[in-house]
């Protein structure tokens, strides 16, 4: 049986992924997917590096998890992501029939869970599924990483 | 210079893709992406075959187009899709900074453009971008293909 880690432990693993994105000059966002207390996939944002609008950490993590489980249904899986998912990613989480999403920093502009749209509060007849969520888990660490990234970017572009 | 085809021509190309999905027992949805009157990518739904929740026709078409243009920005690109995009795909279209989406059949349950959420009517500060749309282009052909697919599926499952 897998060890039962705390939710903070898993978010720290997502933060490790976000730092990998940071190290290659990508907006530092990371995600891990957990099933039965086991991390089954890890990913970080690679939009610039991969020249791919869909290469958000959540999408890459979901695709890796689908491959691992050989199924498009990620039943009983939980995703930990350092920033509030955008509409595309919240939609992918719904489409994957995941159980729950935990996220850190809010994204007031494009966040689709609590900041705008409230996509996971919709009636479960929409997309045939309802996903639980918990917001602002290790919010400060997640937010500080982003702030640091954007402040260095502004410095560099001066 | 590329020939200036009608919008119906491009939707028929998307329908051809949808028929490819039909022929491998996938829900028949197809998409093409057009830039400067040229079709730069074609794709069909492969969720079941690829065991991948993200393998909707729009996502695959977007990823192919990004690869072709070597950019995550699909500026001035238009996507033709046989069915109203779900939230994930509408989000991906926004994230790709596409110019316009044309779609055929409505999806009253999961459609995120006119049936629910109205994701493309949001203020352009959301996701930094505004995408135009035209609904119900060759609606009957697109809808009939879906109806035929689901009626045969019900027959088979009796």
Image (cartoon, coloured by chain):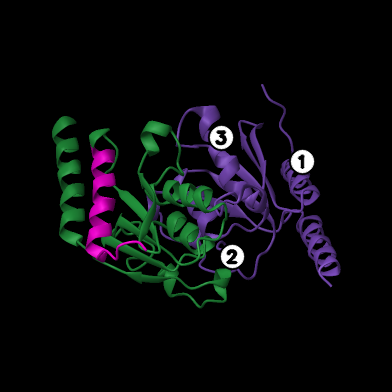
Chain colours: A purple, B green
- Which residue is farthest top? A1
- In percent of the image, x 52 and y 30: which residue is there? A67
Residue A146 % position (x, y): 77, 60
Tell me the residue that label 2 is attached to.
Answer: A114
Q: Are marks 1 and 2 on the same chain?
A: yes
Q: Position of residue A157 (x, y in %)?
A: 81, 69
Please tell me which residue lies in front, A1 or A54.
A54
Q: Which residues are magenta?
A: B1-22
Q: Which label was assigned to residue B90?
A: none
Q: Where residue B157 sits in the image (x, y, percent)?
A: 19, 31
Q: Provide the residue designation for mark 3.
A: A65
Write down the quadrant of residue B151 in the picture.
top left
Q: Secondary structure at mark 3?
A: helix
Q: Using the rendered image, report if marks 2 and 3 lie on a common chain.
A: yes
Q: Secondary structure at mark 2?
A: loop
Neighbour tally class for label 3: few under 14, some 14-19, many 20 plus, Cα within 10 Å: many
Chain of the residue where label 3 is placed in the rendered structure: A
Q: Is residue B49 magenta?
A: no
Measured Cα–Cα span from mark 1 to mark 2: 23 Å
Left or right: B18 as drawn, with respect to B34: left
- Estimate the spatial distance between the alpha carbons at disc 2 and disc 3, rounded to whole Å: 25 Å
What residue did someone put label 1 on? A9
Q: Give the mark toward the camera: 2 or 3.
A: 3
- Note whether A36 is above or below B92 in the view shown: above
Whether residues under marks 2 and 3 lie with C-beta atoms below 8 angstroms apart, the answer is: no
Quadrant for the C terminus of chain B in the image: top left
Q: Is residue B30 at all visible to an observer of this figure?
A: yes
């Amino acid at each position: 049986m897998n060890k039962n880690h705390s939710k903070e432990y898993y978010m720290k693993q997502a933060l490790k992924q976000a730092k990998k994105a940071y190290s290659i000059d990508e907006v530092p966002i990371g995600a891990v997917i957990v099933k039965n207390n086991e991390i089954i996939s890890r990913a970080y944002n690679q939009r610039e590096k991969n020249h791919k609008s869909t290469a958000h950490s959540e999408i890459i993590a979901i695709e890796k998890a689908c491959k691992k489980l050989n199924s498009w249904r990620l039943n009983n899986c939980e995703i930990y992501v350092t920033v509030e998912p955008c509409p595309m990613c919240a939609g992918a989480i719904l489409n994957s029939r995941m159980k729950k999403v935990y996220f850190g920093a809010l994204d007031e502009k494009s966040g689709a869970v609590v900041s705008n749209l409230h996509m996971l509060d919709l009636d479960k007849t929409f997309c045939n599924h309802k996903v639980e969520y918990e917001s602002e888990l290790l919010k400060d660490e997640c937010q500080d990483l982003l702030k640091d990234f954007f402040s260095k970017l502004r410095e560099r572009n001066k």
